[in-house]
Image (spheres, rainbow, N blue to C red):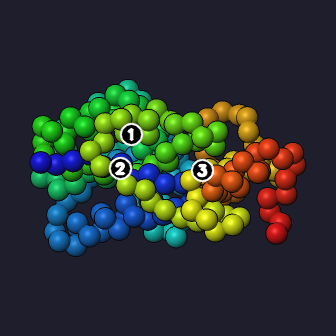
């Protein structure tokens, strides 16, 4: 029986790179995959799935919060891969869950577990509730090299503790950090995050 997987990690942990590698491995065996991503995330182009290493591909399906996944495009698919799953709606996550049951196709979702305030997104929250398998994609803290578990939003003034939950950005706006460094930087005013 197919499973719904949630592979979560902080910013810069290699989630998209992992997704692209899994897609490549299936395709090397002559099997078809479908890559899905939320339309909301257009940092690298309207339809592109891009890792920080520069490896990229075009998404097969873009979803909005109210999207209904067309099951016809899933015929003959060996695996469904979802990038930026934290931006999915609970309804889309539930559709993916149902696809694993009805069509016996594994679905592997990649995304953030929490936002810059350590709160879950709707998509990641629902995945934590219903995924069959949870796997952490690990990286190290930007400051001390311990395991990173949080995402620190930054600006020229230092760490940000307030603002909208969704603000698209990459290395220019976010750093992966461990718990102690998150606490240290979010409790200091005007911390210089770009120095030593």
Circle 3 packing at 10 Å, graded few (<14), some (14-19), many (20+), is many
Q: Where is residue 183 in the image (x, y as percent from the top left)?
A: 72, 48
Q: Earlier in the sequence, mark 2 or mark 1?
A: 1
The residue drawn where x is 38% and y is 30% is 90
Asked whether disc 3 touches disc 2, contact meaning CB atoms under 8 Å apart, the reply is no
Total marks shown come to: 3
Residue 9, image x, y percentages: 49, 54
- Name the secondary structure under disc 3: strand
Residue in the image at 19% along x and 39% along y: 99
- Relative depth, front residue between 144 and 77: 144
| Residue farthest toward the front in the current orientation of the protein | 180
Q: Earlier in the sequence, mark 3 or mark 2?
A: 2
- Looking at the image, which is closer to me, 146 or 150? 146
In contact (CB < 8 Å): disc 2 and disc 1: yes
Quarter that holds the C terminus: bottom right
* Location of residue 144 with respect to 10 vertically, above or below: below
The quarter of the displayed image where residue 48 is located? bottom left
User: What residue does disc 3 label?
Assistant: 150
Q: Residue at x 19, y 59 (%)?
A: 32
Residue position marked by numbered label 1 in the rendering: 128
Q: Mark 2 points at which residue?
A: 134
How far is the residue under mark 3 from the one under mark 2? 17 Å
Q: Position of residue 95 (x, y in %)?
A: 26, 33
Horizontal placement of 18 versus 150: left or right?
Answer: left
Q: Quadrant of residue 69?
A: top left
Residue displayed at 12% across by 42% down: 103
């Amino acid at each position: 029986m197919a499973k719904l997987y949630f592979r979560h990690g902080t910013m810069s942990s290699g989630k998209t790179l992992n997704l692209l590698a899994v897609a490549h491995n299936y395709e090397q065996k002559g099997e078809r995959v479908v890559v899905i991503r939320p339309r909301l995330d257009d940092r690298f182009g309207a339809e592109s799935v891009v890792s920080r290493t520069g490896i990229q591909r075009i998404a097969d399906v873009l979803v909005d919060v109210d999207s209904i996944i067309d099951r016809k495009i899933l015929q003959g698919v060996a695996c469904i891969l979802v990038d930026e799953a934290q931006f999915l709606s609970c309804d889309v996550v539930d559709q993916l869950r149902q696809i694993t049951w009805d069509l016996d196709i594994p679905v592997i979702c990649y995304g953030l577990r929490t936002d810059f305030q350590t709160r879950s997104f709707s998509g990641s929250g629902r995945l934590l509730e219903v995924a069959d398998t949870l796997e952490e994609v690990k990286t190290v803290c930007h400051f001390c090299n311990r395991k990173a578990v949080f995402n620190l939003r930054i600006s020229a003034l230092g760490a940000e503790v307030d603002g909208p939950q969704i603000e698209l950005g990459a290395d220019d706006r976010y750093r992966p950090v461990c718990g102690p460094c998150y606490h240290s930087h979010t409790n200091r005013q005007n911390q210089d995050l770009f120095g030593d």
